[in-house]
Image (cartoon, coloured by chain):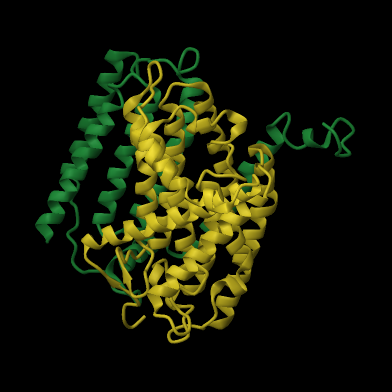
Chain colours: A yellow, B green
Protein backbone atom coordinates (compact mmCIF):
# COMPACT_ATOMS: atom_id res chain seq x y z
CA UNK A 1 0.00 0.00 0.00
CA UNK A 2 2.99 2.30 -0.50
CA UNK A 3 1.58 4.21 -3.45
CA UNK A 4 -1.93 4.69 -4.73
CA UNK A 5 -2.89 1.95 -7.14
CA UNK A 6 -5.04 4.30 -9.18
CA UNK A 7 -5.13 7.98 -10.03
CA UNK A 8 -8.26 10.03 -9.48
CA UNK A 9 -9.16 12.02 -12.59
CA UNK A 10 -10.94 15.38 -12.78
CA UNK A 11 -14.73 15.53 -12.60
CA UNK A 12 -15.38 16.36 -16.30
CA UNK A 13 -14.18 12.85 -17.19
CA UNK A 14 -17.55 11.67 -15.92
CA UNK A 15 -18.75 12.44 -19.45
CA UNK A 16 -16.42 9.80 -20.87
CA UNK A 17 -17.60 7.37 -18.20
CA UNK A 18 -21.20 8.10 -19.21
CA UNK A 19 -20.41 7.54 -22.90
CA UNK A 20 -18.62 4.25 -22.17
CA UNK A 21 -21.42 3.09 -19.89
CA UNK A 22 -24.00 4.05 -22.52
CA UNK A 23 -22.08 2.19 -25.24
CA UNK A 24 -21.87 -0.91 -23.07
CA UNK A 25 -25.55 -0.71 -22.18
CA UNK A 26 -26.45 -0.31 -25.86
CA UNK A 27 -24.22 -3.23 -26.82
CA UNK A 28 -25.88 -5.39 -24.16
CA UNK A 29 -29.35 -4.40 -25.36
CA UNK A 30 -28.38 -5.06 -28.99
CA UNK A 31 -27.10 -8.52 -28.12
CA UNK A 32 -30.30 -9.15 -26.21
CA UNK A 33 -32.36 -7.97 -29.18
CA UNK A 34 -30.38 -10.15 -31.58
CA UNK A 35 -30.89 -13.20 -29.39
CA UNK A 36 -34.59 -12.44 -29.08
CA UNK A 37 -34.95 -12.07 -32.86
CA UNK A 38 -33.13 -15.34 -33.48
CA UNK A 39 -35.30 -17.12 -30.92
CA UNK A 40 -38.35 -15.79 -32.76
CA UNK A 41 -37.02 -17.09 -36.11
CA UNK A 42 -36.12 -13.69 -37.55
CA UNK A 43 -32.63 -12.69 -38.69
CA UNK A 44 -30.50 -11.61 -35.74
CA UNK A 45 -29.62 -8.32 -37.45
CA UNK A 46 -33.19 -7.02 -37.21
CA UNK A 47 -33.13 -7.53 -33.45
CA UNK A 48 -29.70 -5.99 -32.97
CA UNK A 49 -30.95 -2.66 -34.30
CA UNK A 50 -34.05 -2.79 -32.15
CA UNK A 51 -32.70 -0.76 -29.20
CA UNK A 52 -31.89 2.19 -31.48
CA UNK A 53 -35.27 2.15 -33.23
CA UNK A 54 -36.88 1.84 -29.81
CA UNK A 55 -34.97 4.92 -28.63
CA UNK A 56 -36.21 6.86 -31.67
CA UNK A 57 -39.77 5.64 -31.15
CA UNK A 58 -39.86 6.45 -27.43
CA UNK A 59 -38.33 9.90 -27.94
CA UNK A 60 -41.22 10.78 -30.22
CA UNK A 61 -43.91 9.07 -28.18
CA UNK A 62 -46.33 11.31 -26.33
CA UNK A 63 -46.29 10.83 -22.60
CA UNK A 64 -49.32 9.02 -21.19
CA UNK A 65 -50.34 9.61 -17.63
CA UNK A 66 -52.72 8.13 -15.10
CA UNK A 67 -55.29 9.56 -12.71
CA UNK A 68 -53.79 11.05 -9.53
CA UNK A 69 -50.26 9.96 -10.41
CA UNK A 70 -47.51 11.09 -8.04
CA UNK A 71 -45.60 12.78 -10.85
CA UNK A 72 -42.72 14.04 -8.76
CA UNK A 73 -41.75 10.67 -7.31
CA UNK A 74 -42.53 8.85 -10.55
CA UNK A 75 -40.31 11.04 -12.73
CA UNK A 76 -37.62 11.13 -10.08
CA UNK A 77 -37.56 7.34 -9.97
CA UNK A 78 -37.66 6.62 -13.70
CA UNK A 79 -34.93 9.15 -14.47
CA UNK A 80 -32.63 8.04 -11.65
CA UNK A 81 -31.85 4.50 -12.79
CA UNK A 82 -29.26 5.88 -15.22
CA UNK A 83 -27.81 8.03 -12.44
CA UNK A 84 -27.55 5.03 -10.13
CA UNK A 85 -25.65 3.07 -12.79
CA UNK A 86 -23.29 6.01 -13.26
CA UNK A 87 -22.74 6.27 -9.50
CA UNK A 88 -21.74 2.60 -9.53
CA UNK A 89 -19.13 2.95 -12.29
CA UNK A 90 -17.76 6.11 -10.66
CA UNK A 91 -15.70 3.91 -8.31
CA UNK A 92 -14.61 1.39 -10.98
CA UNK A 93 -11.02 2.06 -12.05
CA UNK A 94 -10.51 2.07 -15.82
CA UNK A 95 -6.99 0.78 -15.76
CA UNK A 96 -5.08 3.39 -13.77
CA UNK A 97 -7.78 6.05 -13.75
CA UNK A 98 -10.84 6.32 -11.60
CA UNK A 99 -13.46 9.02 -11.12
CA UNK A 100 -13.69 8.61 -7.37
CA UNK A 101 -10.92 6.82 -5.50
CA UNK A 102 -13.20 6.31 -2.51
CA UNK A 103 -11.71 4.59 0.51
CA UNK A 104 -14.98 2.67 0.87
CA UNK A 105 -15.76 2.04 -2.81
CA UNK A 106 -17.12 -1.45 -2.22
CA UNK A 107 -19.61 -0.17 0.37
CA UNK A 108 -20.47 2.68 -1.98
CA UNK A 109 -21.44 0.20 -4.69
CA UNK A 110 -23.54 -1.64 -2.14
CA UNK A 111 -25.31 1.56 -1.08
CA UNK A 112 -26.13 2.41 -4.69
CA UNK A 113 -27.54 -1.04 -5.35
CA UNK A 114 -29.81 -0.53 -2.35
CA UNK A 115 -30.84 2.78 -3.93
CA UNK A 116 -32.24 0.63 -6.74
CA UNK A 117 -34.78 -0.78 -4.24
CA UNK A 118 -36.01 2.73 -3.64
CA UNK A 119 -36.14 3.57 -7.34
CA UNK A 120 -38.06 0.45 -8.33
CA UNK A 121 -40.58 0.86 -5.55
CA UNK A 122 -41.09 4.55 -6.37
CA UNK A 123 -41.42 3.75 -10.09
CA UNK A 124 -44.17 1.34 -9.03
CA UNK A 125 -45.81 3.81 -6.65
CA UNK A 126 -45.71 6.78 -9.02
CA UNK A 127 -48.42 6.02 -11.57
CA UNK A 128 -51.10 5.16 -8.97
CA UNK A 129 -51.81 1.93 -10.81
CA UNK A 130 -52.23 -1.54 -9.39
CA UNK A 131 -49.88 -3.60 -11.54
CA UNK A 132 -47.09 -1.07 -11.18
CA UNK A 133 -47.44 -0.97 -7.41
CA UNK A 134 -47.53 -4.77 -7.13
CA UNK A 135 -44.37 -4.82 -9.25
CA UNK A 136 -42.68 -2.47 -6.78
CA UNK A 137 -43.68 -4.67 -3.86
CA UNK A 138 -42.49 -7.81 -5.60
CA UNK A 139 -39.12 -6.24 -6.23
CA UNK A 140 -38.69 -5.51 -2.52
CA UNK A 141 -39.70 -9.08 -1.67
CA UNK A 142 -37.09 -10.33 -4.10
CA UNK A 143 -34.53 -7.87 -2.75
CA UNK A 144 -34.83 -9.58 0.65
CA UNK A 145 -33.53 -12.71 -1.05
CA UNK A 146 -30.62 -11.36 -3.09
CA UNK A 147 -29.29 -8.44 -1.08
CA UNK A 148 -27.76 -10.24 1.89
CA UNK A 149 -25.97 -12.89 -0.21
CA UNK A 150 -24.81 -10.07 -2.51
CA UNK A 151 -23.39 -8.16 0.47
CA UNK A 152 -21.39 -11.15 1.64
CA UNK A 153 -20.25 -11.84 -1.91
CA UNK A 154 -18.94 -8.26 -2.07
CA UNK A 155 -17.24 -8.73 1.28
CA UNK A 156 -15.13 -11.69 0.15
CA UNK A 157 -12.77 -9.82 -2.27
CA UNK A 158 -12.56 -6.92 0.19
CA UNK A 159 -11.46 -9.27 2.97
CA UNK A 160 -8.91 -10.92 0.69
CA UNK A 161 -7.49 -7.55 -0.37
CA UNK A 162 -7.68 -6.12 3.14
CA UNK A 163 -9.27 -2.94 1.77
CA UNK A 164 -12.63 -1.53 0.74
CA UNK A 165 -10.93 0.65 -1.89
CA UNK A 166 -11.77 -0.77 -5.31
CA UNK A 167 -8.33 0.08 -6.68
CA UNK A 168 -6.67 -1.88 -3.86
CA UNK A 169 -8.90 -4.88 -4.51
CA UNK A 170 -7.86 -4.84 -8.18
CA UNK A 171 -4.19 -4.36 -7.23
CA UNK A 172 -4.33 -7.38 -4.92
CA UNK A 173 -4.98 -9.54 -7.99
CA UNK A 174 -2.33 -8.09 -10.28
CA UNK A 175 0.97 -9.85 -10.86
CA UNK A 176 3.09 -6.82 -9.88
CA UNK A 177 1.56 -5.87 -6.53
CA UNK A 178 -0.51 -8.91 -5.57
CA UNK A 179 -0.88 -12.61 -6.06
CA UNK A 180 -1.47 -12.48 -9.83
CA UNK A 181 -4.49 -14.70 -9.35
CA UNK A 182 -7.91 -13.23 -10.16
CA UNK A 183 -10.25 -13.63 -7.20
CA UNK A 184 -12.79 -15.47 -9.35
CA UNK A 185 -10.42 -18.46 -9.35
CA UNK A 186 -10.56 -19.04 -5.63
CA UNK A 187 -13.90 -17.31 -4.90
CA UNK A 188 -16.14 -18.82 -7.57
CA UNK A 189 -19.14 -19.02 -5.24
CA UNK A 190 -18.92 -15.35 -4.32
CA UNK A 191 -18.65 -14.50 -8.02
CA UNK A 192 -21.75 -16.52 -8.95
CA UNK A 193 -23.73 -15.03 -6.05
CA UNK A 194 -22.58 -11.57 -7.13
CA UNK A 195 -23.72 -12.21 -10.70
CA UNK A 196 -27.13 -13.37 -9.48
CA UNK A 197 -27.36 -10.15 -7.50
CA UNK A 198 -26.52 -8.12 -10.61
CA UNK A 199 -29.18 -9.93 -12.64
CA UNK A 200 -31.65 -9.23 -9.84
CA UNK A 201 -30.98 -5.51 -9.39
CA UNK A 202 -31.05 -4.84 -13.12
CA UNK A 203 -34.79 -5.63 -13.03
CA UNK A 204 -34.68 -8.12 -15.91
CA UNK A 205 -35.51 -11.81 -16.17
CA UNK A 206 -35.04 -14.42 -14.78
CA UNK A 207 -35.38 -12.32 -11.64
CA UNK A 208 -37.82 -9.81 -13.03
CA UNK A 209 -41.01 -10.21 -11.03
CA UNK A 210 -41.15 -6.41 -10.83
CA UNK A 211 -41.41 -5.83 -14.56
CA UNK A 212 -42.34 -9.12 -16.16
CA UNK A 213 -45.18 -9.98 -18.51
CA UNK A 214 -46.86 -11.90 -15.66
CA UNK A 215 -47.74 -8.51 -14.17
CA UNK A 216 -48.68 -6.75 -17.42
CA UNK A 217 -45.33 -4.98 -17.34
CA UNK A 218 -45.33 -4.22 -13.60
CA UNK A 219 -43.35 -1.07 -12.90
CA UNK A 220 -42.91 -0.64 -16.66
CA UNK A 221 -46.61 -0.99 -17.36
CA UNK A 222 -47.68 2.65 -17.22
CA UNK A 223 -44.47 4.34 -18.34
CA UNK A 224 -44.26 5.85 -21.79
CA UNK A 225 -42.17 8.19 -23.87
CA UNK A 226 -39.02 9.57 -22.30
CA UNK A 227 -39.78 8.10 -18.89
CA UNK A 228 -39.89 4.62 -20.36
CA UNK A 229 -36.75 5.26 -22.38
CA UNK A 230 -34.85 6.37 -19.28
CA UNK A 231 -36.08 3.40 -17.27
CA UNK A 232 -35.17 0.88 -19.98
CA UNK A 233 -31.81 2.54 -20.57
CA UNK A 234 -31.25 2.65 -16.82
CA UNK A 235 -31.75 -1.05 -16.28
CA UNK A 236 -29.48 -1.89 -19.22
CA UNK A 237 -26.92 0.48 -17.72
CA UNK A 238 -27.31 -1.19 -14.30
CA UNK A 239 -26.50 -4.56 -15.84
CA UNK A 240 -23.46 -3.04 -17.58
CA UNK A 241 -22.38 -1.31 -14.36
CA UNK A 242 -22.71 -4.59 -12.46
CA UNK A 243 -20.51 -6.28 -15.06
CA UNK A 244 -17.99 -3.41 -14.88
CA UNK A 245 -17.76 -3.58 -11.09
CA UNK A 246 -17.07 -7.33 -11.23
CA UNK A 247 -13.86 -6.62 -13.18
CA UNK A 248 -11.80 -5.02 -10.37
CA UNK A 249 -13.56 -7.16 -7.78
CA UNK A 250 -13.24 -10.65 -9.24
CA UNK A 251 -11.67 -10.59 -12.70
CA UNK A 252 -8.27 -9.13 -11.92
CA UNK A 253 -8.96 -5.52 -12.91
CA UNK A 254 -6.86 -4.30 -15.83
CA UNK A 255 -4.26 -7.04 -15.71
CA UNK A 256 -3.72 -9.04 -18.88
CA UNK A 257 -1.20 -9.58 -21.68
CA UNK A 258 -0.57 -7.34 -24.73
CA UNK A 259 -3.39 -4.82 -24.34
CA UNK A 260 -3.13 -1.78 -22.03
CA UNK A 261 -4.91 -2.11 -18.71
CA UNK A 262 -7.83 0.20 -19.56
CA UNK A 263 -8.56 -1.89 -22.65
CA UNK A 264 -8.57 -5.06 -20.56
CA UNK A 265 -11.12 -3.54 -18.20
CA UNK A 266 -13.42 -2.79 -21.14
CA UNK A 267 -12.86 -6.21 -22.75
CA UNK A 268 -13.58 -8.05 -19.51
CA UNK A 269 -16.64 -5.91 -18.82
CA UNK A 270 -18.03 -6.54 -22.30
CA UNK A 271 -17.35 -10.26 -22.03
CA UNK A 272 -19.08 -10.59 -18.66
CA UNK A 273 -21.96 -8.44 -19.87
CA UNK A 274 -22.42 -10.74 -22.88
CA UNK A 275 -22.39 -13.80 -20.64
CA UNK A 276 -24.97 -12.24 -18.32
CA UNK A 277 -27.23 -11.33 -21.26
CA UNK A 278 -27.01 -14.83 -22.73
CA UNK A 279 -27.49 -16.60 -19.40
CA UNK A 280 -30.42 -14.38 -18.53
CA UNK A 281 -32.34 -15.54 -21.59
CA UNK A 282 -31.79 -19.21 -20.79
CA UNK A 283 -33.08 -19.26 -17.23
CA UNK A 284 -36.75 -19.56 -16.30
CA UNK A 285 -38.43 -16.76 -14.35
CA UNK A 286 -38.34 -17.28 -10.61
CA UNK A 287 -41.21 -16.26 -8.34
CA UNK A 288 -40.11 -14.02 -5.46
CA UNK A 289 -41.30 -16.46 -2.78
CA UNK A 290 -39.41 -19.35 -4.37
CA UNK A 291 -36.40 -17.12 -4.80
CA UNK A 292 -36.58 -16.16 -1.13
CA UNK A 293 -36.25 -19.80 -0.14
CA UNK A 294 -33.33 -20.19 -2.54
CA UNK A 295 -31.70 -16.99 -1.31
CA UNK A 296 -31.87 -17.77 2.39
CA UNK A 297 -31.27 -21.51 2.31
CA UNK A 298 -28.73 -21.80 -0.53
CA UNK A 299 -27.20 -18.48 -1.61
CA UNK A 300 -26.66 -16.97 1.85
CA UNK A 301 -25.02 -20.06 3.44
CA UNK A 302 -22.95 -20.55 0.30
CA UNK A 303 -21.76 -16.94 0.36
CA UNK A 304 -20.97 -17.19 4.08
CA UNK A 305 -19.00 -20.40 3.60
CA UNK A 306 -17.08 -18.73 0.78
CA UNK A 307 -16.34 -15.82 3.09
CA UNK A 308 -15.15 -18.25 5.77
CA UNK A 309 -12.77 -19.91 3.30
CA UNK A 310 -11.42 -16.52 2.23
CA UNK A 311 -11.02 -15.37 5.83
CA UNK A 312 -9.17 -18.56 6.79
CA UNK A 313 -6.87 -18.20 3.79
CA UNK A 314 -6.16 -14.55 4.66
CA UNK A 315 -5.43 -15.39 8.29
CA UNK A 316 -3.25 -18.32 7.28
CA UNK A 317 -1.29 -16.19 4.83
CA UNK A 318 -0.53 -13.35 7.21
CA UNK B 1 -10.72 23.98 2.08
CA UNK B 2 -11.93 23.93 5.67
CA UNK B 3 -14.31 26.79 4.91
CA UNK B 4 -15.76 24.88 1.96
CA UNK B 5 -16.21 21.88 4.20
CA UNK B 6 -17.94 23.95 6.88
CA UNK B 7 -20.30 25.45 4.31
CA UNK B 8 -21.09 22.00 2.90
CA UNK B 9 -21.64 20.68 6.40
CA UNK B 10 -24.03 23.53 7.18
CA UNK B 11 -25.90 23.06 3.91
CA UNK B 12 -26.31 19.36 4.54
CA UNK B 13 -27.58 20.14 8.04
CA UNK B 14 -30.19 22.49 6.58
CA UNK B 15 -31.22 19.84 4.02
CA UNK B 16 -31.53 17.24 6.76
CA UNK B 17 -33.69 19.47 8.96
CA UNK B 18 -35.90 20.80 6.13
CA UNK B 19 -36.58 17.40 4.58
CA UNK B 20 -37.15 16.03 8.08
CA UNK B 21 -39.70 18.75 8.81
CA UNK B 22 -41.42 18.28 5.44
CA UNK B 23 -42.19 14.70 6.47
CA UNK B 24 -45.03 16.12 8.53
CA UNK B 25 -46.28 18.53 5.87
CA UNK B 26 -46.89 16.16 2.97
CA UNK B 27 -50.05 14.11 2.63
CA UNK B 28 -48.65 10.97 1.04
CA UNK B 29 -47.05 8.11 2.93
CA UNK B 30 -44.58 7.51 0.08
CA UNK B 31 -43.44 11.13 0.09
CA UNK B 32 -43.17 11.20 3.88
CA UNK B 33 -41.10 8.01 3.92
CA UNK B 34 -38.69 9.12 1.23
CA UNK B 35 -38.35 12.65 2.60
CA UNK B 36 -37.20 10.97 5.79
CA UNK B 37 -34.81 8.89 3.68
CA UNK B 38 -33.49 12.10 2.07
CA UNK B 39 -32.97 13.56 5.53
CA UNK B 40 -30.94 10.52 6.58
CA UNK B 41 -28.92 10.63 3.36
CA UNK B 42 -27.98 14.24 4.19
CA UNK B 43 -26.93 13.08 7.67
CA UNK B 44 -24.86 10.28 6.13
CA UNK B 45 -23.19 12.74 3.79
CA UNK B 46 -22.28 15.02 6.69
CA UNK B 47 -20.78 12.05 8.53
CA UNK B 48 -18.62 11.46 5.44
CA UNK B 49 -17.54 15.10 5.64
CA UNK B 50 -16.46 14.44 9.23
CA UNK B 51 -13.84 11.99 7.85
CA UNK B 52 -15.86 8.92 8.74
CA UNK B 53 -16.33 7.65 5.18
CA UNK B 54 -17.27 4.13 6.14
CA UNK B 55 -19.78 5.11 8.80
CA UNK B 56 -21.33 7.74 6.52
CA UNK B 57 -21.80 5.45 3.53
CA UNK B 58 -23.16 2.71 5.77
CA UNK B 59 -25.66 5.20 7.24
CA UNK B 60 -26.85 5.95 3.69
CA UNK B 61 -26.98 2.25 2.82
CA UNK B 62 -28.88 1.21 5.93
CA UNK B 63 -31.29 4.12 5.85
CA UNK B 64 -32.23 3.65 2.19
CA UNK B 65 -32.83 -0.02 2.90
CA UNK B 66 -34.74 0.69 6.06
CA UNK B 67 -36.94 3.37 4.51
CA UNK B 68 -37.70 1.15 1.49
CA UNK B 69 -38.94 -1.56 3.84
CA UNK B 70 -40.56 0.89 6.24
CA UNK B 71 -42.52 2.44 3.37
CA UNK B 72 -44.18 -0.92 2.78
CA UNK B 73 -45.21 -1.23 6.42
CA UNK B 74 -46.33 2.39 6.64
CA UNK B 75 -48.59 1.99 3.65
CA UNK B 76 -49.91 -1.25 5.08
CA UNK B 77 -50.62 -0.21 8.64
CA UNK B 78 -50.68 3.56 9.05
CA UNK B 79 -53.55 4.54 6.82
CA UNK B 80 -57.21 3.89 7.25
CA UNK B 81 -57.56 1.54 4.34
CA UNK B 82 -54.45 1.36 3.84
CA UNK B 83 -52.38 4.48 3.23
CA UNK B 84 -52.65 4.40 -0.53
CA UNK B 85 -54.83 7.52 -0.33
CA UNK B 86 -53.72 11.00 0.75
CA UNK B 87 -53.66 11.28 4.53
CA UNK B 88 -52.42 13.57 7.27
CA UNK B 89 -49.04 12.77 8.78
CA UNK B 90 -49.82 14.33 12.17
CA UNK B 91 -52.16 13.62 15.03
CA UNK B 92 -52.63 14.82 18.61
CA UNK B 93 -51.37 18.22 17.44
CA UNK B 94 -51.02 20.12 20.72
CA UNK B 95 -49.38 17.33 22.71
CA UNK B 96 -47.07 16.50 19.82
CA UNK B 97 -45.91 20.11 19.53
CA UNK B 98 -45.25 20.33 23.29
CA UNK B 99 -43.31 17.06 23.27
CA UNK B 100 -41.29 18.13 20.21
CA UNK B 101 -40.41 21.58 21.59
CA UNK B 102 -39.45 20.11 24.98
CA UNK B 103 -37.19 17.55 23.34
CA UNK B 104 -35.63 20.19 21.12
CA UNK B 105 -34.92 22.54 24.02
CA UNK B 106 -33.45 19.71 26.13
CA UNK B 107 -31.16 18.54 23.34
CA UNK B 108 -30.15 22.06 22.31
CA UNK B 109 -29.33 23.00 25.89
CA UNK B 110 -27.36 19.78 26.20
CA UNK B 111 -25.38 20.54 23.07
CA UNK B 112 -24.57 24.04 24.29
CA UNK B 113 -23.66 23.03 27.83
CA UNK B 114 -21.55 19.93 27.21
CA UNK B 115 -17.84 20.78 27.39
CA UNK B 116 -16.89 19.37 24.00
CA UNK B 117 -13.27 18.32 23.79
CA UNK B 118 -11.24 19.90 21.01
CA UNK B 119 -9.41 17.64 18.63
CA UNK B 120 -5.80 17.58 19.77
CA UNK B 121 -4.39 15.05 17.34
CA UNK B 122 -5.40 13.23 14.21
CA UNK B 123 -5.55 9.47 14.79
CA UNK B 124 -2.69 7.65 13.19
CA UNK B 125 -2.39 4.00 12.40
CA UNK B 126 -0.98 1.69 9.77
CA UNK B 127 -4.05 2.39 7.62
CA UNK B 128 -3.41 4.38 4.45
CA UNK B 129 -5.82 7.29 4.72
CA UNK B 130 -6.82 9.57 7.56
CA UNK B 131 -10.49 8.68 7.17
CA UNK B 132 -9.71 5.00 7.63
CA UNK B 133 -7.60 5.78 10.68
CA UNK B 134 -10.42 7.93 12.12
CA UNK B 135 -12.98 5.18 11.51
CA UNK B 136 -10.66 2.65 13.12
CA UNK B 137 -10.09 4.89 16.12
CA UNK B 138 -13.84 5.42 16.54
CA UNK B 139 -14.53 1.69 16.34
CA UNK B 140 -11.78 1.03 18.86
CA UNK B 141 -13.11 3.71 21.21
CA UNK B 142 -16.68 2.37 21.00
CA UNK B 143 -15.96 -1.34 21.14
CA UNK B 144 -12.45 -1.78 22.47
CA UNK B 145 -11.89 -5.32 23.56
CA UNK B 146 -15.54 -6.20 23.09
CA UNK B 147 -15.37 -6.32 19.30
CA UNK B 148 -15.28 -10.10 19.12
CA UNK B 149 -18.17 -10.41 21.57
CA UNK B 150 -20.25 -7.92 19.57
CA UNK B 151 -19.59 -9.71 16.32
CA UNK B 152 -20.61 -13.06 17.77
CA UNK B 153 -23.69 -11.56 19.42
CA UNK B 154 -24.74 -9.97 16.12
CA UNK B 155 -24.70 -13.38 14.43
CA UNK B 156 -26.78 -14.86 17.22
CA UNK B 157 -29.23 -11.97 17.01
CA UNK B 158 -29.64 -12.36 13.27
CA UNK B 159 -30.15 -16.11 13.60
CA UNK B 160 -32.70 -15.51 16.36
CA UNK B 161 -34.65 -13.03 14.26
CA UNK B 162 -34.73 -15.32 11.23
CA UNK B 163 -35.65 -18.35 13.32
CA UNK B 164 -38.33 -16.37 15.13
CA UNK B 165 -39.94 -15.32 11.87
CA UNK B 166 -39.77 -18.83 10.44
CA UNK B 167 -41.41 -20.32 13.54
CA UNK B 168 -43.99 -17.56 13.90
CA UNK B 169 -45.22 -17.83 10.32
CA UNK B 170 -48.26 -20.03 10.06
CA UNK B 171 -47.37 -20.95 6.51
CA UNK B 172 -43.63 -20.66 6.53
CA UNK B 173 -41.79 -23.89 6.96
CA UNK B 174 -44.25 -26.58 6.08
CA UNK B 175 -46.56 -25.23 3.46
CA UNK B 176 -44.31 -25.97 0.54
CA UNK B 177 -44.08 -29.59 1.68
CA UNK B 178 -47.82 -30.06 1.12
CA UNK B 179 -50.45 -31.60 3.41
CA UNK B 180 -48.59 -34.87 3.74
CA UNK B 181 -45.29 -33.06 4.47
CA UNK B 182 -43.63 -35.16 1.80
CA UNK B 183 -43.08 -32.42 -0.74
CA UNK B 184 -44.84 -32.90 -4.03
CA UNK B 185 -47.99 -30.98 -4.92
CA UNK B 186 -49.30 -28.10 -2.92
Instruction: Work out whether residue A255 or residue B178 is closer to the camera in this orientation and state it.
Output: A255
Image side of residue B100 versus residue A30, left or right = left
In the rendered image of this protein, does residue A257 appear above or below residue B88? below
Image side of residue A216 versus residue B114, left or right = right
Instruction: Work out whether residue A106 or residue A233 is closer to the camera in this orientation and state it.
Output: A233
In the rendered image of this protein, does residue B147 appear above or below residue A57? below
In the rendered image of this protein, does residue A93 appear above or below residue B55? below
The answer to whether residue A16 of the structure is visible from this angle is: yes
In the rendered image of this protein, does residue B27 appear above or below residue B148? above
The answer to whether residue B157 of the structure is visible from this angle is: no
Residue sitting at x 27%, y 44% = B42
Name the spot of residue A195 as percent of width and height, x first: 57, 57
Outermost residue to the left:
B3
Position of the N terminus of chain B, as image quadrant, is bottom left
In which image quadrant can residue A167 be found? bottom left
Instruction: Work out whether residue A42 or residue B85 is closer to the camera in this orientation and state it.
Output: A42
Image side of residue A249 versus residue B138, left or right = right
Image side of residue A137 versus residue A101, left or right = right
Name the spot of residue B52 as percent of width and height, x first: 30, 58
Position of the C terminus of chain B, as image quadrant, is top right
Name the spot of residue B173 as percent of width and height, x first: 75, 37
Q: How many marks?
A: 0
In which image quadrant can residue A303 be found? bottom right
Name the spot of residue A157 as percent of width and height, x first: 51, 68
Residue sitting at x 46%, y 25% = B74
Residue sitting at x 87%, y 36% = B181
Amino acid sequence: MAEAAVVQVAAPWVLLAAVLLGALALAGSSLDGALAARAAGRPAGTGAGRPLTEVARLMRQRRRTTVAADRLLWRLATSSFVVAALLMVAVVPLGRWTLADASVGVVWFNAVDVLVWVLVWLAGWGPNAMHSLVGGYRFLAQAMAYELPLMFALTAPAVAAGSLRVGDVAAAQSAESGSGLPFVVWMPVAFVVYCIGVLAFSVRGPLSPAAGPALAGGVLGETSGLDRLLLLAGRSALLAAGAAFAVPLFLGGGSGPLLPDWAWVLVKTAALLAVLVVVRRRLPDVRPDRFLALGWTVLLPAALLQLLVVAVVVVGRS
Amino acid sequence: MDLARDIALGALGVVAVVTGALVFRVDSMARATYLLAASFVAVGASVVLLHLDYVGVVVVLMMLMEMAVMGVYMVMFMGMNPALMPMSMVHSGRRAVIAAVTCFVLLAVGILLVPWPTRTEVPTSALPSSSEATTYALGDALMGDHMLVMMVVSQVMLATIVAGIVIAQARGRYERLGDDLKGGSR
